[in-house]
Image: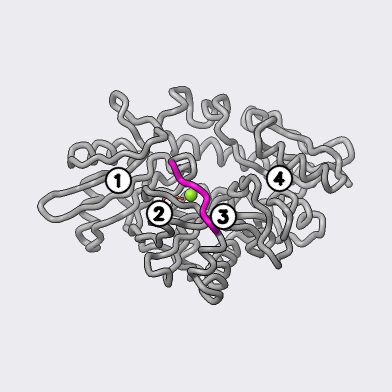
Amino acid sequence: MTAFTVIGTPGDRRTAFFSDACRAAALPEPRVVSWPDVLGGGLELDGTDGPGPVRIDSPGEDTEVDALLRGPGDPARVGGGARWYRTFTRGLSRIAAEAERAGARLLNDIDDIAVMCDKRRCHARLLAAGVPVPDVLPAVRDYAELRARMDESGMRRVFVKPAHGSSASGVIALQTAPRGRIKAVTSAARRGDGYVNSLRVRSYDTESEVAHLVDTLAPDGLHVERWLPKATLDGRVFDLRVVVIAGEATHAVVRTSRSPMTNLHLGGARGDLDAVRRALGDDGWRRALDVCARAAACFPGSLMVGVDLLVGLGRRQVAVGEVNAFGDLLPGITGLPGGVAEGLDTYTAQVRAALSGNVPACTT
Ligand SMILES: Nc1ncnc2c1ncn2[C@@H]1O[C@H](COP(=O)(O)OP(=O)(O)O)[C@@H](O)[C@H]1O
Ligand SMILES: [Mg+2]
């Protein structure tokens, strides 16, 4: 068996976990190609024994890669998503061209990845396929347009998301009320004229502060959707991250939080999956996993996707918050009981699926 090639960040947890999975399957050590090699034009996928399957992983939080993608500046700053996306998708095109030249098989389709890394396009693709998603507002270019669209649609509570963001960077849970009252909950902290990512979620409650924040983020593109009040467990809201591998929902984690964002670095914590399953009931749980599989089916060239599944307050409604191209970093989580990945971590399950040929048809 020829070695896998991983395009990622050498030495980070993602590549280490994938190497562990290859080793456990008695495969040769994967070759790791760094994103700077891709972006700098030094990509070569031939390999010593011919081109192995290629896994494209996250450019991650590496500061060198971040500077290449977003341009120079404080790595903690919020924003820069438009440039990040342009550079990133150029890198994806290079990977596809090189894979084609070398005859290498990509485990995830570059167009799928590009759509998942644009929350507007991702939402539109899910909506077109009939996958439940929160209602969306038409495109807004600034705060004034945001308020106008909210008024027209009657939406008082929305999530404003940078189109190319991740890790909740720049995400705003915004609520408005009569007599000009407003509250924006976000991890973006004001620094000078801009914002930096903070580990503390805070709120802005004057219109001038909120307008400044939205107007700062808007040039990079915004996706705005209805705020779906989330179900709670022991007084904390929760959602689910469900990993779908080769069409099957294989892994799930509950993410709970006291703030509207459940991302773990913002004070979110893992919750009790059995309790959520009990709360949803057998039918509700099956429906939830089915929605995740349908969301994944919108990305047929991808061996794996990570679905953020929102569960509404009454626990009857579920909706997909986003689909993550690199959503498989779930340390310590093994596959759902009774499924093909029972007992396996997300990386091992992908190695197995790739080797069994049970892989969606990947195009380049
Ligand atoms: N429409 C929504 N209603 C309620 N909560 C939401 C909505 N969209 C996202 N969230 C919450 O916000 C967090 C971040 O949003 P997400 O779209 O996943 O962006 P990111 O790519 O930054 O993780 C998620 O943890 C989710 O729980
Ligand atoms: Mg998310």
Is residue 138 shown in magenta? no
Q: Residue 172 in the image: x percent, y percent?
A: 34, 45
Name the residue rendered at 87%, 35% in the picture.
48
Scheme of colours in the image: one colour
Mark 1, secondary structure of its residue? loop
Q: Which residue is mark 1?
A: 141
The earlier-in-sequence mark between 2 and 3 is 2
Q: Is residue 298 above or below residue 269?
A: below
* Distance (Cα) linking label 2 and label 1: 33 Å
Q: From the Cβ of disc 4, is ligand 1 less than 8 Å away? A: no
Badge 4 is on which residue? Answer: 55
Whole-angstrom CA distance, mark 4 to mark 3, is 23 Å
- N-terminal of the pair, mark 3 or mark 1, is 1
Relative vertical location of residue 51 with respect to residue 123 in this rendering, above or below? above
**Quadrant of the rendered image containing residue 213:** top left
Disc on the earlier residue, 4 or 1: 4
Which label sits in the foreground, 4 or 2? 2
- Residue type for callout 1: Arg
Residue 77 visible within the image: yes
Q: Are marks 4 and 1 in contact (CB under 8 Å)?
A: no
Q: Residue type at mark 4?
A: Arg
Horizontal arrangement in the rendering, residue 207 relative to residue 100 (left or right): left
Residue visible at 52% across and 50% down in the picture: 270
* Rendered image: mark on residue 253: 3
